[in-house]
Amino acid sequence: MASLSEEVLLVVKKVRQKKQDGTLYLMAERIAWGPEGKDRFTVSHSYSDIRCQKISPDGKAKVQLQLVLHTGESTTFHFANESTSRKDWEAAKELLQQLLPKFKKKANKELEEKNKMLQEDPVLFQLYKDLVVSQVISAEEFWANRLGGINNGESAACENKQEVGISGAFLADIRPQTDGCNGLRYNLTADIIESIFRTYPAVKQKYKENVPHNLTEKEFWTRFFQSHYFHRDRISTGTQDIFSECARQDEKGLKSLVTQGVKNPMVDLLSLEDKTLDEGYGISSALPSTSHASRTVKESSNFAIIKRFNHHSAMVLAAGSRKRDVPADQASETSSTDGNSRDSDFFQPPLKKVKLQEAIEYEDLQQENRPKTVALNLKKSDRYAHGPVPLQSQQYTTSQDIINSVNYIKHEMSNYKPNLTQVLSSAAASSAIAALSPGGVLMQQVAQQAINQMVPTEIQAELKHLYVAAGELLRHFWTCFPVNTAFLEEKVTKMKSNLERFQITKLRPFQEKIQRQYLSTNLTGHLECMLQAAYSKFHIWQTRRMMRKT
Amino acid sequence: MKLNIDGLLVYFPYDYIYPEQYSYMLELKRTLDAKGHGVLEMPSGTGKTISLLSLIVAYQRAFPLEVTKLIYCSRTVPEIEKVVEELRKLMEFYAKETEEVNNFLALALSSRKNLCIHPEVSSLRFGKEVDGKCHSLTASYVRAQRHGNPNQPVCRFYEEFDAVGRQVPLPAGVYNLDDLKDLGRRKGWCPYYLARYSILHANIVVYSYHYLLDPKIADLVSKELAKKSVVVFDEAHNIDNVCIDSMSVNITRRTLDRCQNNVDTLQNTIQRIKETDAAKLREEYRRLVEGLKEANVARETDVYLANPVLPDEILKEAVPGSIRTAEHFVGFLRRFLEYLKSRLRVQHVVQESAPQFLKDIFDKVCIDRKPLRFCAERLQSLLRTLEITDISDFSAVTLISNFATLVSTYSQGFTIIIEPFEDRTPTIANPVLHFSCMDPSIAIKPVFQRFQSVIITSGTLSPVDIYPRILDFRPVTMASFTMTLARTCLCPLIVGRGNDQVALSSKFETREDFAVIRNYGNLLLEMSAVVPDGIVAFFTSYVYMENIVASWYEQGILENIQRNKLIFIETQDAAETSMALEKYQEACENGRGAILLSVARGKVSEGIDFVHHFGRAVIMFGVPYVYTQSRILKARLEYLRDQFQIRENDFLTFDAMRHAAQCVGRAIRGKTDYGLMIFADKRYARADKRGKLPRWIQEHINDGSLNLTVDEAVQLSKHFLRQMAQPFSQVDQLGLSLLTLEQLESPEMLKKIAQIAHQT
């Protein structure tokens, strides 16, 4: 096997599997285990097949590691080296922890993709059932040359993959747990950290500045949770807190957001009132004064909470759309250089007009007056969706054209006047009609009874499946030619046997079934023809090879 | 479509019509025919504005001599712009149908801040600054000075307008605020003054309440509007408060200090002018002897709108001798100021009536009632004479003089309360003199008297009979319309209990109760899990919301809510709230869903609509009673009881319920819209509260949903939301809540329509 060229990341000796001593290898793409004294692996799992690893709890005598595969199978390794078992186990676990997530996404995506393909394409699904489930060929073979397509599509999909937003409650999900001795434990996952960074860029900045030069990662997060920044309702007391700067930055960001004002004039509370009362008029006393000096501690803490929620929600929302905003920002910057965007009046009216029109619209009071169209009646929607790409748009007619031409024809028809002097003779006409009637010279083909009238539908369906399956196998077979590598050689022989197996397990029973029902055995003739052609090709190839070898 | 409303041909710019719109137009037509006033309540989102406009425009075209002008007053700038856009639609329809050139002129008027195109002035942020700066560039004497000194800065837009803008009237058409600005830019004319000038001959004017109800502005802008106008107050559920606000004055120590400075400046200026240009002062004196005769003539011929600050009697007389010369007047102001200062030096709360105040001022500093009444007018004259450029600096002394005039003019309907400190902070001395108006009819009286038809309309005016009482007028029509619905698209629920059977209420005794707060939190939490997109929650007051939010935070309820939706909270800072609001809409738009915590009576509850997915549920936490301990409110309640025989509790409940209705009504803005209305307080179930909700909400509250637990409410909501999420097309509505012309004309439909209007 090609495993020798693989990069081996970790080798752990004295690992037992199924009561057998051996060596565990962790390589770049798979984990493998071979029994002692043999140079091949009896166990080999690609990381992408592993769903998760399970570990035995601390302090248990047996130090074990279990790998659970996506298929549900599991493999257990027992670290048996007395002195270093725990260390080995730690190392393996750590490494796996780093490796698995990398492959997880890929594996999941592949699985998902395969699933999706099968669900979306009933023909493929049938094929899968016919070939893989009945074990004519293995699943890997089945996917081998389809996944190419997937991967190509994937690379394109990857680029504009949809950005996943952030849960609004990600901070709430960090449930602190008491650890029994007056402490709190926070469980942080990579996702949460990612969320924090995306939502609060200021924290990310701090992280970059301080970790790992000044603080360890753990210390950093400890401070984060202790900081007043995290507990916004506590009033800031000291300034030694590294996050107090974050708070200030946030404050600034919020301020700038506020001063930017809102784009939608319908929600701008500042310009809502046309004419505010002058100072000193009106019954203003109903509102309690809100100057900061007169606030009690509780009030200002409440105030901070409210501010925080607004800010948090705004940041979460912004984090979700930040990616999109970046180019827009640049665009606005460039446009601002030409001096126009200074004057807000130039840009405001369109949005405002649209909003105003929206606001006064009564959709149900209006007649729906879209242009008249021809209703699209799809018999096979998938054909519509995957139809040929139009190369020349002129070939296509708009619905208006169709309507026009229909009208035109109608018009023509109504004005049709037979030109009775220039008509065919009656004899010629009747012979032409006879030729075009069923049984006539020109309609001989049609005269034959169509297959769909002779054969019951279930047989037809079965035949179809057979055709599809055979086609698939033959496709595999023929792609092997010209056979110029060892791999292809191997494959072509395998395909040949696959074909034979197909003939025996699928085709024969079908033929027998047809015979039992006294139907024309001719049905499978073409199929056999195709198989025969493949066999003869194989024979020719094989005899040539023999000749070359001898 | 073209409708026949009681013999009047009405062009309606849609192909279909709601039955209630037809009914509304019928009532409106009757009101106009009778040349009287009307109170009409029609649910929001049923096309009230377009019905009003269609009918009144048709009326104007049919009887151009009977109704010459429509004055449409709305509350907010976006509302004003919406009305103009609807009008534009109507006018386009007219043009299309009649195929003749329309000679209608319709325009919106707003403050300088929204209309100014002067590059420097329009960049100022606050309306007051814009007004002040504008005045300093356009005042007559500033421009006069320019003749001698070409360097004197003036506004070129105003100059241009003044030179040529008045010669040709504005061409017919519909002008929104932006259209006016565009026109102004093109022609180089000041849009604000152009609009102010043009409203005199426009057929339709759309502007805000203040231009009619605030005497200080009305006197400048709306004085000369034609008597044969129809005035419409849209969104008028708060009209009494607008009236009261425009007539009330608060004086603090700071006001008095600034006033002192003003008076000093006046004194110095007078001194200077006396040395350089004594003739000017003599001229002023002469004019004052002549009295305000000219104004009097104008008012007698009924050209002017009466000004409650400048009562009729004043106009008949000359300014009293004691304040006729400038120095005497300044001295008079000084004395008055000193007196006010002494009054603010109190240790306990004082409440007195206007006559008591006048008697006291006469006893203490020998100031008579008569010169006080002329104070406002005399000051204006003086400021004009002294050629003060920046009027906004003199707001303090203007305030004091207005107060002087008001207090000496009205012996009834006002009260004076002097508080040495705020109730919440008894240790900090912060004396305030409240001169508060208790009778909204004073400010609106000139409007009712002058204009032939005044229509008061809103989505929530229930109970409609209270408005004529507190505004003191006799309407010819009072009607409340329901919303005809093909599907019940609103679902009012009264949640009276928590799942643990604790009674939910925001009443004072249980306000701090943790059980109630927790149950409120649970309600919001559960709702956030079942309601799609946006939820708006209203609290009874800002302080209450702060406390609840804090304790929800401590109990971890907010964290759980965050799992379902983002949370945005209204703050007292308008800019911050605007941002939160926009983010809220963004979150609803992108599918994440959000909750907006807001305050009844706040800016959001008054001015922002939550259409469609922006508000699928509104939760009203508690009954939004006004802060009842305020002395001003107590005085007003007393006054209402004595003068209008309205019991305190009736008024308080009415006031609370109209705000609650206003809040929950924000969610439904049309028949295709749908939303939950959750009243989370057991008191809503009581007949006296429930009965004061608008009829279109009331009729959907069934007896089964009067005292629900949180769980029951969630179940009902789920069911409702699932039903509403089904596709709903125009066809479903046709014939029931949406009519074609043929359907409208069928006799059985006409019979049905007659029942829509609920006469009172």
Image (cartoon, rainbow, N blue to C red):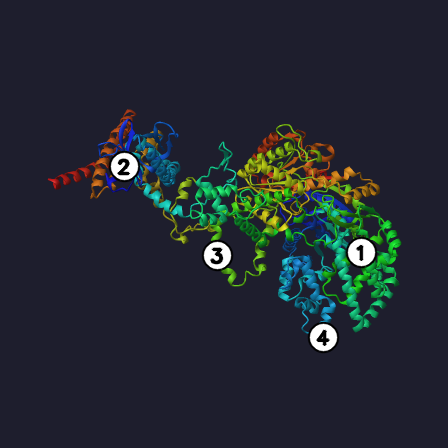
Q: CA distance from mark 2 to mark 4?
A: 103 Å
Residue corresponding to mark 2: A473
- Which mark lies nearer to you, 1 or 2? 1
Instruction: Classify mark 4: residues with Cα within 10 Å, few (<14), some (14-19) or many (20+).
Output: few
Question: Distance between the Cα atoms at labels 1 and 4?
Answer: 37 Å
The type of residue carrying mark 4 is Gly
Q: Is residue B186 left or right of residue A202?
A: right
Against B135, residue B680 (above or below) is above
Q: List x then y, in percent, for residue B342.
A: 81, 53
| Residue assigned mark 3 | A330
- Mark 3 → mark 1, Cα distance in angstroms: 55 Å
Callout 1: residue from which chain? B
Give the secondary structure at mark 2. Answer: helix
Chain under label 2? Answer: A
Secondary structure, mark 1, is loop
Tag 3, which chain? A
Q: Are marks 3 and 1 in contact (CB under 8 Å)?
A: no
- SS of the residue under disc 4: helix
What's the amino acid at mark 1? Asn
Kind of residue at badge 2: Leu
The reply to whether label 2 and label 3 mark residues of one chain is yes
* Disc 4 target residue: B148
Figure quadrant of residue B560: top right
Residue nearest the observer in this picture, B410 or A377: B410
The residue singled out by tag 1 in the image is B307
Q: Position of residue A131 (x, y in %)?
A: 30, 33
**SS of the residue at dot 3?**
helix
Q: Residues within 10 Å of mark 1 (few under 14, many from 20)?
A: many
Q: Is residue B411 visible?
A: yes
